[in-house]
Image (tube, rainbow, N blue to C red):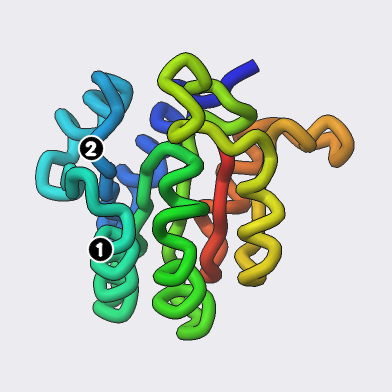
Amino acid sequence: MNYRKQILDLLIPHFERDETYHLLVCDMGFGSYDQIRLRFPNRVTNAGIMEQSTVGIAAGMAIGGMVPVVYSIVNFICFRAIEQVRNDIILQGLNVKLIGTGANDYFEKLGRSHTCARDDVKIMELVKMPIFDPYEMNRRSISFSQMVDTWITSDKAGYLRV
Protein backbone atom coordinates (compact mmCIF):
# COMPACT_ATOMS: atom_id res chain seq x y z
CA MET A 1 0.00 0.00 0.00
CA ASN A 2 1.20 3.50 -0.81
CA TYR A 3 -0.49 6.52 0.74
CA ARG A 4 0.87 9.22 -1.61
CA LYS A 5 -2.46 10.09 -3.24
CA GLN A 6 -4.54 9.69 -0.11
CA ILE A 7 -2.53 12.10 2.03
CA LEU A 8 -3.11 15.06 -0.23
CA ASP A 9 -6.82 14.31 -0.52
CA LEU A 10 -7.05 14.06 3.27
CA LEU A 11 -5.47 17.49 3.68
CA ILE A 12 -8.26 19.28 1.78
CA PRO A 13 -10.82 19.35 4.64
CA HIS A 14 -8.15 20.68 7.00
CA PHE A 15 -7.21 23.41 4.51
CA GLU A 16 -10.92 24.29 4.22
CA ARG A 17 -11.30 24.67 7.99
CA ASP A 18 -8.03 26.41 8.80
CA GLU A 19 -6.53 29.18 6.68
CA THR A 20 -3.16 28.92 8.45
CA TYR A 21 -2.22 25.74 6.56
CA HIS A 22 0.17 26.26 3.63
CA LEU A 23 1.63 23.52 1.42
CA LEU A 24 5.27 23.83 0.38
CA VAL A 25 6.16 21.37 -2.37
CA CYS A 26 9.78 20.52 -3.18
CA ASP A 27 9.66 20.31 -6.99
CA MET A 28 7.43 17.31 -7.23
CA GLY A 29 3.90 16.07 -7.14
CA PHE A 30 3.30 15.29 -10.80
CA GLY A 31 -0.33 16.31 -10.52
CA SER A 32 -0.83 14.76 -7.10
CA TYR A 33 -1.31 18.11 -5.37
CA ASP A 34 -3.42 19.70 -8.13
CA GLN A 35 -6.64 19.49 -6.10
CA ILE A 36 -5.12 21.51 -3.26
CA ARG A 37 -3.41 23.93 -5.64
CA LEU A 38 -6.63 24.56 -7.58
CA ARG A 39 -8.74 25.07 -4.45
CA PHE A 40 -6.19 27.05 -2.44
CA PRO A 41 -3.88 28.69 -5.00
CA ASN A 42 -2.56 31.24 -2.51
CA ARG A 43 -1.65 28.54 0.00
CA VAL A 44 0.47 26.28 -2.20
CA THR A 45 4.06 27.04 -3.14
CA ASN A 46 6.34 24.91 -5.29
CA ALA A 47 9.68 25.82 -3.70
CA GLY A 48 11.75 23.84 -6.18
CA ILE A 49 14.78 21.67 -5.53
CA MET A 50 15.89 23.28 -2.29
CA GLU A 51 14.75 21.13 0.59
CA GLN A 52 17.03 22.75 3.17
CA SER A 53 15.76 26.22 2.33
CA THR A 54 12.17 25.00 2.17
CA VAL A 55 12.43 23.71 5.74
CA GLY A 56 13.87 27.09 6.77
CA ILE A 57 11.04 28.91 5.00
CA ALA A 58 8.54 26.63 6.75
CA ALA A 59 10.12 27.45 10.12
CA GLY A 60 9.74 31.17 9.40
CA MET A 61 6.12 30.64 8.41
CA ALA A 62 5.48 28.76 11.66
CA ILE A 63 7.06 31.59 13.68
CA GLY A 64 4.61 33.90 11.88
CA GLY A 65 1.60 31.82 12.99
CA MET A 66 1.09 29.63 9.94
CA VAL A 67 1.11 25.83 9.85
CA PRO A 68 3.35 24.90 6.93
CA VAL A 69 3.24 21.43 5.40
CA VAL A 70 6.42 20.47 3.53
CA TYR A 71 5.95 17.77 0.87
CA SER A 72 9.09 16.16 -0.53
CA ILE A 73 10.61 12.84 -1.46
CA VAL A 74 11.44 11.06 1.77
CA ASN A 75 15.21 10.88 1.41
CA PHE A 76 15.57 14.57 0.55
CA ILE A 77 13.77 15.56 3.75
CA CYS A 78 15.62 13.09 5.96
CA PHE A 79 19.11 13.27 4.42
CA ARG A 80 19.45 16.67 2.74
CA ALA A 81 17.48 18.79 5.19
CA ILE A 82 18.02 17.05 8.52
CA GLU A 83 20.14 19.86 9.98
CA GLN A 84 17.35 22.35 9.26
CA VAL A 85 14.73 19.93 10.60
CA ARG A 86 16.67 19.69 13.86
CA ASN A 87 17.80 23.29 14.26
CA ASP A 88 14.95 25.21 12.67
CA ILE A 89 11.97 23.07 13.71
CA ILE A 90 12.73 20.74 16.62
CA LEU A 91 15.07 22.92 18.70
CA GLN A 92 12.69 25.86 18.34
CA GLY A 93 9.58 23.81 19.09
CA LEU A 94 7.82 24.89 15.91
CA ASN A 95 4.67 23.42 14.43
CA VAL A 96 5.87 22.38 10.98
CA LYS A 97 4.41 19.32 9.28
CA LEU A 98 6.65 17.21 7.07
CA ILE A 99 5.48 14.68 4.50
CA GLY A 100 8.13 12.31 3.19
CA THR A 101 6.67 10.72 0.08
CA GLY A 102 8.06 7.56 -1.47
CA ALA A 103 8.65 5.75 1.82
CA ASN A 104 9.86 2.16 1.71
CA ASP A 105 11.77 2.73 -1.55
CA TYR A 106 8.74 3.59 -3.70
CA PHE A 107 11.03 5.55 -6.05
CA GLU A 108 13.73 2.87 -6.38
CA LYS A 109 13.49 2.93 -10.18
CA LEU A 110 14.88 6.48 -10.04
CA GLY A 111 18.09 5.20 -8.43
CA ARG A 112 19.63 5.07 -4.99
CA SER A 113 19.53 8.87 -4.69
CA HIS A 114 15.74 8.60 -4.37
CA THR A 115 15.54 5.81 -1.78
CA CYS A 116 16.35 5.23 1.86
CA ALA A 117 14.46 2.08 2.93
CA ARG A 118 13.52 2.84 6.55
CA ASP A 119 16.55 4.99 7.36
CA ASP A 120 14.25 8.02 7.47
CA VAL A 121 12.65 6.67 10.64
CA LYS A 122 16.04 6.24 12.32
CA ILE A 123 17.18 9.71 11.28
CA MET A 124 13.99 11.44 12.43
CA GLU A 125 14.19 9.57 15.73
CA LEU A 126 17.75 10.89 16.20
CA VAL A 127 16.54 14.50 16.06
CA LYS A 128 13.44 13.70 18.16
CA MET A 129 10.94 14.43 15.39
CA PRO A 130 7.57 12.77 16.11
CA ILE A 131 6.97 10.13 13.42
CA PHE A 132 3.64 9.10 11.95
CA ASP A 133 4.06 5.86 10.04
CA PRO A 134 0.99 4.37 8.36
CA TYR A 135 2.94 1.21 7.55
CA GLU A 136 3.05 0.55 11.28
CA MET A 137 -0.52 1.65 12.04
CA ASN A 138 -1.95 -1.87 11.92
CA ARG A 139 -0.12 -2.44 15.17
CA ARG A 140 -1.90 0.60 16.60
CA SER A 141 -5.39 -0.22 15.32
CA ILE A 142 -6.05 3.20 13.79
CA SER A 143 -6.97 4.18 10.28
CA PHE A 144 -4.80 6.29 7.99
CA SER A 145 -7.30 9.15 8.10
CA GLN A 146 -7.22 9.08 11.93
CA MET A 147 -3.42 9.18 11.81
CA VAL A 148 -3.50 12.15 9.43
CA ASP A 149 -6.01 13.98 11.65
CA THR A 150 -3.80 13.48 14.71
CA TRP A 151 -0.67 14.57 12.81
CA ILE A 152 -2.12 17.66 11.14
CA THR A 153 -4.11 18.99 14.13
CA SER A 154 -1.32 18.59 16.67
CA ASP A 155 0.28 21.82 17.82
CA LYS A 156 3.69 20.16 17.51
CA ALA A 157 5.88 19.24 14.56
CA GLY A 158 5.44 15.85 12.94
CA TYR A 159 6.85 13.73 10.15
CA LEU A 160 4.43 11.61 8.11
CA ARG A 161 6.02 9.02 5.86
CA VAL A 162 3.94 8.02 2.87
Q: Is residue 125 left or right of residue 54?
A: right
Where the C terminus falls, by quadrant?
top right
Q: Secondary structure at mark 1?
A: helix
Tell me if mark 2 has few (under 14), some (14-19) or many (20+) residues whose alpha carbon lies within 10 angstroms of its own.
some
Residue 154: x, y in percent?
56, 63
Q: Is residue 104 left or right of residue 28?
A: right
Q: How many marks?
A: 2
Quick one: 87 or 156, which is closer to the camera?
87
What residue lies at 62% left-to-right and 70% top-to-bottom? Answer: 127
What residue lies at 46% left-to-right and 84% top-to-bottom? Answer: 92
Q: Which residue is mark 2?
A: 27
Q: To which quarter of the image does residue 28 belong? A: top left
Q: Are marks 1 and 2 in contact (CB under 8 Å)?
A: no
135 vs 126: above or below: above
Q: CA distance from mark 1 to mark 2?
A: 13 Å
Quick one: 141 or 16, which is closer to the camera?
141
**Amino acid carrying mark 1 in the image:** Ser
Tell me if mark 1 has few (under 14), some (14-19) or many (20+) residues whose alpha carbon lies within 10 angstroms of its own.
some
Give me the disc on residue 71: none
Q: Which residue is mark 1?
A: 53
Residue 38: x, y in percent?
15, 29
158 vs 64: above or below: above
Q: Residue furthest right?
A: 139
What residue lies at 52% left-to-right and 76% top-to-bottom? Answer: 90
54 vs 71: above or below: below
Residue 125: x, y in percent?
69, 62
**Amino acid carrying mark 2 in the image:** Asp
